[in-house]
Image: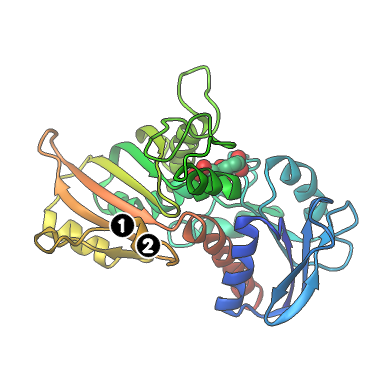
Amino acid sequence: KKVNLAVVGATGMVGRTFIKVLEERNLPIDNIYFFSSSRSAGSTVTFNNKEYVVEELTETSFDRGIDIALFSAGASVSEKFAPIAASKGCVVVDNSSCWRMNEKVPLVVPEVNPQDISCHQGIIANPNCSTIQAVVVLKPLHDKYKIKRIVYSTYQAVSGAGHNGYMDLENGLKGEPPKKFPHPIAGNCLPHIDSFLPNGYTKEEMKMVNETRKILGDYSIRITATTVRVPVFNGHSESINVEFEKQFDLEELKEVLRNAPGVVVQDDVANNVYPMPIYASGRDETFVGRIRRDESVESGVNLWVVADNIRKGAATNAVQIAEELIKMWNK
Ligand SMILES: O=C(O)C/C=C/c1cccc(C(=O)O)c1C(=O)O
């Protein structure tokens, strides 16, 4: 059965990657529609060698029998239009933070909690990019050793802040002042992603804390996070320190990761083999290395995890959710 699919936010960095990933994975699409703000409406996008005019998103955009809508147009657009789309029988896969913590909305990484997809009531939320790559690696370890505590330290590429963030690094390297970031990012690190909250954490840090618990379905896990913008064009890196309830054998733990869906282990330091953004960029897997015991606790491990934040961190994850929906409908 073919589906009618809409891309909302079609001209943004994630929207354009939705299109690329939809082509690569050859979803059974009958009709496809592209929507954007009035600012970008009228421009054209190419899908499967055919040109389409991008339409302005309105309340009636979903009155044409759309089965799935992939949203990446910001939280305010999702807040207004996702319920409208859902009310017309469309299933929305939303890349914004708007609906992620809503108890009626499953928050899904297909390799981690695919079973939650069938609980949807019209909207399925795509997690934050930094959370996605972390839980892909943590889920198999949680299942086997039961996670007690996680310490996240992230090194996030400028592409996570969209085109303007990307240009701040490109132009910053030529000495130009930043437009998107509060300080120069070239040759610098900013411990500031999204806005600061009263508890001194940023929204990005609390997204990782809250979303990890919801996706793993375990609100007893203790988590803290520090998220940092670094002068890397694309690909997020994360140092993840994990403490388990149970003891583990390090070689067995590495084997668990080698067998985990969506994970590639790159861990051979004698030959300088470890995950790097320049390698992960453009790929859909989550890469893990520097796997070593944390000798400072009873049962702990340190991991270095890298993934393409625009692909697996957003577009590919959302398209994989769409694939699962289509599989469910075709059973
Ligand atoms: O900055 C990054 O590396 C990730 C940014 C994610 C982001 C940026 C603006 C708005 C949102 C949002 O939807 O709130 C999000 C997100 O959480 O996915």
Return the x and y of residue 293 as percentages of the image width and height: 13, 45
Q: Residue 51: x percent and y percent?
A: 77, 77
> On screen, 155 above or below 198?
below
Amino acid, disc 1:
Met
* Element under disc 2: helix
Q: Provide residue 54's location: percent of width, then percent of height.
A: 80, 64
Can residue 128 be seen by looking at this rendering? no
Q: Which residue is mark 2?
A: 280
Amino acid identity at mark 2: Ala
**Given contact means CB atoms under 8 Å apart, are the residues at marks 1 and 2 in contact?**
yes
Which mark, by number, is residue 276?
A: 1
Between 201 and 276, the residue placed more toward the observer is 276
Residue in the image at 13% along x and 36% along y: 298
Report the disc number at residue 90.
none
Quadrant in the rendering for residue 231:
top left
Would you call the spot at circle 1 few (<14 residues within 10 Å), some (14-19), or many (20 or more)?
some
Q: Quadrant of the N terminus?
A: bottom right
In the figure, is residue 82 to the left or right of 282?
right
| Ligand 1: quadrant of the figure | top right
Q: Quadrant of the C terminus?
A: bottom right
Determine if residue 108 is in view.
yes
Viewer-nearest residue: 266 or 39? 39
